[in-house]
Amino acid sequence: MKSETPTPALAAFAQSYTAAWCSQNPASVAAHFTPGGSLTINDGAPAIGRDAIAKAAQSFMTAFPDLQVLLDGLVVQDGRTLYHWTLTGTNTGPGGRGRRVRISGYEEWTIGGDGLIANSLGHFDSSEYNRQLNPA
């Protein structure tokens, strides 16, 4: 596996994407994707297109009104970009139980010719996430 240092433009893009997740503006997240781009979270059904991606982002933003995403690292490896993140927030949205969560994960990006995300495969430990939301 060959790793490369991210370009300054890619690093700035990752910072902008991180800020979008913290903005409570799901369209801002979706704007980082190509018009027909896709976001898949933990092998779930892909959100295809900016409207669907915005809805996926909105679900997290609604559940966690104080949502914060931290950029933990960015690696370019074998033509893919790995965006490592940590999400924190308190589940005080509709039906929330006021539980604080902190989970880390990563997205595997395929960047399109326009410099936007064409495909993102997101990964995080859903068992740990559910444990934090619903402790025994």
Image: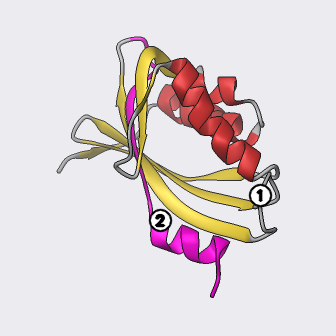
The image quadrant where one finds the C terminus is bottom right
Disc 2 marks a residue whose amino acid type is Ser
- Coordinates of residue 100 in the picture (x, y in percent): 75, 70
Residue 47, picture quadrant: top left
Q: Is residue 9 above or below residue 11?
A: above
Disc 1 marks a residue whose amino acid type is Gly
Task: Please name the residue shown 47% across and 72% down the image.
Answer: 127
Residue 89, picture quadrant: bottom right
Q: Is residue 69 magenta?
A: no
- Coordinates of residue 20 in the picture (x, y in percent): 68, 33
* Label 1: how many Cα within 10 Å (few below 14, some 14–19, many 20+): few
Horizontal relation, residue 121 to residue 12: left or right: left
Nearer to the camera, 56 or 22: 56
Q: Is residue 41 above or below residue 120?
A: below
Task: Please name the residue shown 82% across and 59% down the image.
Answer: 92
Residue position marked by numbered label 2 in the rendering = 126
Task: Please name the residue shown 39% across and 35% down the image.
Answer: 46
Secondary structure at badge 2 equals helix
Q: Earlier in the sequence, mark 2 or mark 1?
A: 1
* Label 2: how many Cα within 10 Å (few below 14, some 14–19, many 20+): few
Residue position marked by numbered label 1 in the rendering = 95
Q: Name, please, the residue furthest toward the left.
A: 1
- Point out the stretch of residues depicted in magenta: 114-136
Number of marks: 2
In the rendered image, is residue 32 in sight? Answer: no
- Coordinates of residue 91 in the picture (x, y in percent): 76, 61
In the rendered image, is residue 1 in sight? Answer: yes
Q: Is residue 55 above or below residue 40?
A: above
